[in-house]
């Protein structure tokens, strides 16, 4: 995994100095601690910071050919198949990303249709100085850009664009409201006024420093009716092939790898598949557990699974003191903000795993593809059967904390719902498609990317693979949900191949006890947050203090956490101040 960045210039525009490129590279160094490389090309500059995973001695980038120059952040899992199908002499390295360059030479801007993997790629065309910016269909790997007077600058993280000085530290108020109400933001725009996301599956053709063309590659198969005559036996056989095929492809690496194990269905399924593959040494697994009286976790279940699979397992205990000491650094890595408190265990697990491995497999995507969330089942019912729209309430609705009533915070989701109607065949798949378009890339995958890359770890998500997606998307609703339980087929597969996982048993859940932790420090934290200028601009200080002191309440806790997150995020990424010690030290300055 790596960091990429660069600039596509308008003809005749002045080039930035090497110091600007070095500032961008420095901001991306945590993504690629094994070295930074530059290419100053006609009308373009490219930057690559490398985390060595495959072809350790020979895989440095940029990768060059007579036709063009490529930098990439990602893994191309069908690289062996591409090499086998192409003339061997075309390849100069063992880097899996070189296959993307070769496919671009053959297919032009449509090259991503041939790639199986996760990626953010920039390619400079030697013939005409055009630059292509591409992102994988699920949005597993991030890519951002800003348009400025001299052209377009792009990078793996907004922090690199801010460090360059080409993007100002100003925020969009509408996106701030969306963050407060949803805990993430949707669509192409970010909370920074001049920084945009390259959308999942999008390829931008940049000509003369301007965007000339946009194309989108969907992560989902073309709209088709689910196979209603698909038997359970056939579906289980197809799922078994898909999971084993994907996990085997995702295990390809020249460095040690491991698995985050929550005790839930998704990570248990990955563990089960990984346990069926030969390996020279024990698999390493990690689980988080919280030290708090109200904490509900599945650490015991995860440990039992790990023991049955004979993994080298560690339980990482997370205390309130650890959180308060490290929270400013955790929030600092979320430059594209996600106020999902699952960033806390993910960051601590990554810090621990970094001591032993360079690659982590994780179960993101299982709920979205196999219909795991209860909100899907509710939203799929008609209104007369108590059907409820997803994301119908915002985080601060009814709390009387904000100085105003946000009224456009749901616009991005409404657009996603309208688009989902055009590409799905059933109401159930429609609501799944909304989350795949927005919640998955802009919350779950963004969280995984930033928290792992903060420690120089690559994250891989085998459930978000075309082979698995094609299998899941053809399932009839009866194999997605049955007897009130989602992920029905995935549970049946797990029951067949690892009955010790007990996949049909009620689950405790994996909940960060953020409300009780905040309540223990409610008076102090409430006062510190209420006095922040960015909070005073949007919220009533007395109501903020009351919210924090009553944070153990089920609704108050997440709202208090969101304000705490935003206060630290604004200080770090809008004001540009470096985190200073603990959360109390940082907010006291």
Image: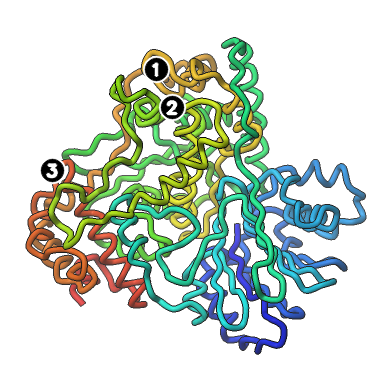
Report the residue at 23% width, 59% height from top: 563
Report the residue at 13% width, 54% height from top: 400
- Of mark 1 and mark 3, the one earlier in the sequence is 1
Report the residue at 92% width, 49% height from top: 87
Choose between 244 and 420: the one closer to the eye. Answer: 420
Choose between 256 and 439: the one closer to the eye. Answer: 439
Choose between 390 and 481: the one closer to the eye. Answer: 390
Report the residue at 48% width, 37% height from top: 312
Q: Secondary structure at mark 2?
A: helix
Residue 358 showing in the rendered view: no
Q: Is residue 288 above or below residue 381?
A: below
Q: Nearer the viewer, mark 2 or mark 1?
A: 1
- Name the mark on residue 305: 2
Q: Which residue is mark 3?
A: 553
Q: CA distance from mark 2 to mark 3?
A: 33 Å
Q: CA distance from mark 1 to mark 3?
A: 30 Å
- Name the mark on residue 504: 1
* Residue 504: percent from left, percent from top: 39, 17
- Quarter assignment of residue 405: bottom left
Left or right placement of residue 107 versus residue 546 in this view:
right
Crowd band around label 3 with a 10 angstrom C-alpha radius: few (<14), some (14–19), many (20+): some
Q: Is residue 452 above or below residue 574?
A: above
């Amino acid at each position: 995994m790596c960091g990429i960045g660069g600039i596509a210039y308008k003809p005749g525009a002045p080039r930035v100095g090497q110091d600007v490129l070095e500032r961008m590279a420095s901001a991306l160094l945590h993504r690629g601690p094994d070295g930074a490389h530059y290419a100053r090309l006609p009308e373009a500059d490219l930057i690559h910071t490398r985390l060595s995973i495959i072809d350790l001695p020979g895989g440095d980038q940029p990768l060059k050919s007579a036709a063009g120059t490529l930098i990439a952040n990602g893994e191309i899992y069908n690289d062996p198949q591409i090499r086998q199908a192409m003339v061997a002499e075309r390849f100069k390295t063992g880097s899996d990303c070189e296959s993307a360059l070769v496919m671009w030479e053959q297919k032009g801007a449509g090259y991503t249709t041939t790639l199986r993997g996760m990626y953010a790629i920039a390619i400079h065309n030697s013939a005409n100085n055009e630059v292509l910016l591409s992102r994988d269909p699920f949005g597993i790997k991030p890519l951002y850009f800003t348009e400025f007077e001299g052209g377009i600058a792009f990078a793996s993280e907004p922090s690199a664009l801010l460090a360059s000085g080409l993007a100002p530290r100003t925020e969009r108020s509408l996106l701030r409201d969306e963050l407060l109400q949803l805990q993430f933001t949707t669509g192409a725009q970010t909370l920074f006024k001049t920084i945009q996301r390259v959308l999942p599956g999008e390829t931008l053709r940049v000509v003369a420093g301007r965007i000339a063309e946009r194309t989108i590659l969907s992560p989902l198969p073309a709209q088709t009716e689910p196979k209603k005559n698909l038997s359970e036996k056939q579906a289980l056989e197809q799922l078994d092939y898909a999971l084993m095929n994907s996990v085997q492809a995702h295990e390809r690496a020249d460095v040690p790898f491991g698995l985050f194990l929550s005790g839930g269905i998704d990570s248990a399924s990955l563990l089960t598949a990984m346990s069926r593959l030969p390996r020279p040494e024990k698999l390493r697994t990690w689980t988080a557990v919280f030290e708090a009286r109200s904490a509900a976790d599945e650490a015991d279940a995860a440990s039992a699974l790990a023991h049955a699979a004979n993994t080298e397992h560690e339980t990482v205990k997370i205390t309130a003191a650890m959180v308060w000491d490290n929270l400013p650094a955790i929030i600092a890595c979320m430059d594209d903000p996600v106020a999902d408190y699952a960033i806390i265990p993910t960051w601590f697990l990554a810090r621990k795993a970094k001591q032993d491995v360079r690659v982590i497999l994780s179960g993101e995507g299982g709920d979205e593809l196999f219909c795991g969330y209860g909100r899907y089942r509710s939203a799929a019912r008609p209104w007369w059967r108590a059907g409820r729209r997803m994301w119908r309430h915002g985080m601060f609705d009814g709390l009387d904390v904000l100085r105003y009533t946000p009224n456009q915070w749901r616009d991005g989701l409404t657009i996603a719902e309208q688009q989902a109607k055009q590409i799905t065949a059933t109401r159930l798949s429609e609501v799944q498609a909304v989350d795949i378009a927005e919640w998955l890339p802009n919350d779950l995958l963004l969280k995984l990317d930033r928290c792992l890359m903060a420690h120089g770890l690559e994250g891989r998500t085998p459930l978000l693979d075309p082979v698995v997606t094609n299998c899941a998307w053809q399932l009839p609703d009866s194999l997605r949900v049955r007897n009130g339980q989602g992920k029905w087929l995935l549970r049946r597969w797990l029951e067949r191949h690892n009955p010790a996982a007990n996949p049909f048993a009620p689950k405790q859940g994996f909940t960060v006890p953020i409300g009780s932790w905040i309540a223990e420090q409610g008076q102090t934290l409430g006062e510190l947050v209420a006095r922040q200028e960015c909070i005073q601009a949007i919220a009533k200080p007395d109501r903020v203090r009351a919210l924090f002191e009553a944070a153990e309440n089920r609704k108050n806790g997440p709202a208090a956490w969101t304000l705490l997150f935003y206060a630290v995020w604004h200080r770090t990424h809008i004001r540009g101040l470096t985190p200073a010690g603990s959360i109390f030290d940082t907010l006291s300055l």
